[in-house]
Amino acid sequence: MPTSLDSITIPQLMSFTDTDEQFLFCNSNTPHKVIAFASETVLQILSENHHWNADGTFRTAPSLFSQAYYIHVWDEYSMKPMFSMQEKNITLKPFSILIDFEQSSINAINKVFPSTKVKCCHFHYAQNIWKKLKKYDLVKLSKEEHIRRQIANIISLPLVPTNEINNCMEQIIDVLCNIDSKFEKFTDYVLNNYVEDARSSSDIWNHFDSIGERSHTNSHVEG
């Protein structure tokens, strides 16, 4: 077993596919150690698919590495793991890439694919909302039918037209804060992070313009 990044060598078995296609296409030491795998066949599939899903994992990254990162696309049957690079006359120019709410990934995609739409996972958006309900001790209140309906409306904001988000949120705030002032901090969180001058632009987390075109979650690429 290697004891340092510099001592890692990639065996022949991992450098080529079973059909003798080159599989190892990047083994760089500068400025950081990066090892990447993809065959020409996979790159061709990637180039033909307009919508990608990408996700990184720290928990299952190989020993000595801080992160493993994957790019997936759909074929006619299921979501397939791929990767990306521009070589061998294969042009990679996706219309959209769906990721989690990771600023480093957003920055990297904007740099490498400036014309590509970055979209953030609807499931992770809903998780963020639920975490704040727990933080502000609102879970029990949220089980009441008239409150549960408004929480569902917040979770559904990614599916409404962007020009209607502010109006929808105003109505939700009116209902929730009139029921209980405890919801003020929670609705302030939603406004500050997703709606008014938000940290996450609605163009990133809203999926109305891609309904029927692509998946809206990264759940199937987790792990």
Image: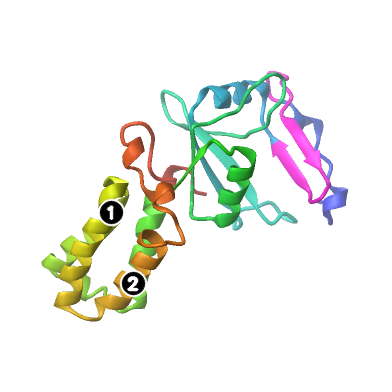
Magenta stretch: residue 62 in it?
A: no
- Compared across the picture, whether 23 is left or right of 149 comes to right
Specify whether residue 192 is in view. Answer: yes
- Say what amino acid the circle numbered 1 marks: Ile
| Residue 148 falls in image quadrant | bottom left
**Disc number placed over residue 188 in the picture, else none:** 2
- Figure check: 28 above or below 66: above
- Compared across the picture, whether 39 is left or right of 125 comes to right
Q: Could you tell me residue 14's position as x and y percent?
A: 74, 33
C-alpha separation, residue under disc 2 versus residue under disc 1: 15 Å
* Residue under the image location 63 percent in, 43 percent down: 111
* Residue under the image location 39 percent in, 67 percent down: 192
Task: Residue under label 1, please give it.
Answer: 165
Q: Which class describes the residues within 10 Å of circle 2: few (<14), some (14-19), or many (20+)? A: some
- Compared across the picture, whether 94 is left or right of 170 comes to right
Query: In this figure, which colouring scheme has been used for the structure?
Result: rainbow
- Please report whichever mark, 2 or 1, sits nearer to the chain's N-terminal start: 1
* Region of the chain picked out in magenta, as a range: 17-36
Q: Could you tell me residue 186's position as x and y percent?
A: 31, 73
- Compared across the picture, whether 11 is left or right of 133 comes to right
Q: Main secondary structure of the magenta part?
A: loop
Q: Could you tell me residue 219's position as x and y percent?
A: 42, 47
| Residue 18 falls in image quadrant | top right
Magenta stretch: residue 32 in it?
A: yes
Q: Are marks 2 and 1 in contact (CB under 8 Å)?
A: no
Q: Nearer the viewer, residue 195 or 119?
A: 195
| Residue 136 falls in image quadrant | bottom left
